[in-house]
Image: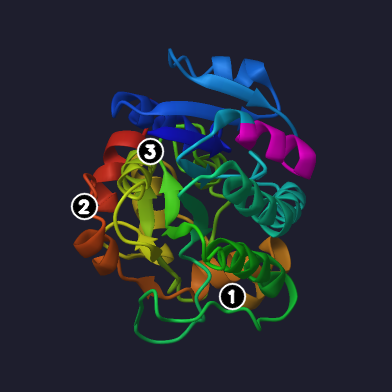
Amino acid sequence: MKVFLAGGTGVIGRPLVHQLIGAGHDVTVFSRSEDRVAELGVPGVRAAVGDALQADQVAAAVAAAKPDVVINQLTNLAQSANPVALKRGMVATSRLRRQASRTLVESARAAGARRIVAQSISFAYRPGPGVRTESDSLWTDAGGQIGEVIRPVAELEAHTLGAKDLESVVLRYGTFYGPGSYYGVGGAFSDLVAKRRLPIGGTGGGQFGFLHIDDAARATVAALDGPTGIFNVVDDVPAPSSEWILFLASLLEAKPPMRVPEALLKMTTGKFSAYLMCRQPAVSNARAKAELGWTPVVADWHDGFKSTCGPA
C-alpha cells in the first residue's frame, strides 16, 4: 500500500522506514530536508520536503503522494539531556501535536486516504495504584509542566480519533530505547548514568514501560490494517526507575546512582521528569498483543538493555 510518513527521519522513523519497505509498501517520507531522507539509506523511498507547521505544505505533499495510510510520527525533541534543552524540545513537540496532527488529518481526508496512524505516549496516565489500560484517562488536569506536556498529547489523540471518515489508530508507545535513542550507546540518558548524574528520586517507584525501537516499528506496521482505536505499545516487564537506573549503571560499569528526595528531583529536572521517575504507573500491552497481532520481540527490557545499551 501507499504510505505517507511524517516524521520518518527520527528515532523510530529509521527502523520504521526499513520495515515498511521490507514489507513491500510504497513509502513517502515527509521531512524538512531531502538530505535527511537520503541519509536513511533505504532505496525506493520518496522524499517530500516541507515544514510540518505550514498547513499548505503538508496538504500539498499528502495530495501528491495519494496515500492509503498517513502515519504521524512528528516530534522535535532535544538530543541533549540538559533540562533547558529538554523543555525547549517538549514545547516544540507540543506545538506539533496540537497543530500538525490536525493538519495531517485534514490532509489525509482531502487526499482520499483510508487510515491515519498517530504516535502518542503511554507515560501520560494519571498516577496511582494499578496497571493502566487504554480505557484509563490521561492526566490532562495536571498542573504545571506535567499538564503542559500531557494536554497536547490528548489534543493529538482527539484530532486523530475524531476523524470519523478515516480509520483512526493511536499508538501509545512506551519509552524508546535502542540505537539513536536517549538510552542507546552514547545517548543522553545513558551518558548521564555513566557520569553518575541521573539520580534515583524518592523511592524510585515510577514504572517505565520500555520499548525497543524495532518493536515500536513492528507495531506501527501491524497497525496499517485491522482494528482501530488506542493501543498501548510497551514491552512485557514494567521497569521501576530504581531498578533500571541501577541495571544500566552496572552495564556501563559506572558507579551506582545517587539517591535524592523527590522534591529535589522536581527542582533540578522538572516536574514531568520527576513524575516519570517517581510516580508514573505501569501500563498493559494486552490489547495490542491480542488485537494487532503484535508481540514484542524484545519482551524484557533487561535483555534489550544488555544488547543495545551497554558499552560499544
Q: Nearer the viewer, residue 5 or 96?
A: 5
Residue beneath label 1, please?
261
Q: Nearer the viewer, residue 61 or 79?
A: 61
For residue 47, side relative to residue 239 (left or right): right
- Residue name at image x 70 percent, y 47 percent: 82
Q: Position of residue 1 (x, y in %)?
A: 37, 33
Say if the magenta span includes residue 57. Answer: yes
- Residue name at image x 56 percent, y 63 percent: 163
Say if the magenta span includes residue 145. Answer: no
Q: How is the image coloured?
A: rainbow
How far is the residue under mark 1 from the one under mark 2? 37 Å
Disc 1 is placed on an element classified as: loop
How far is the residue under mark 3 from the one under mark 2? 21 Å
Q: Position of residue 31 (x, y in %)?
A: 65, 29
Residue beneath label 2, please?
295
Residue beneath label 3, please?
309
Task: Tell me if label 3 and label 2 are in contact, CB under 8 Å.
Answer: no
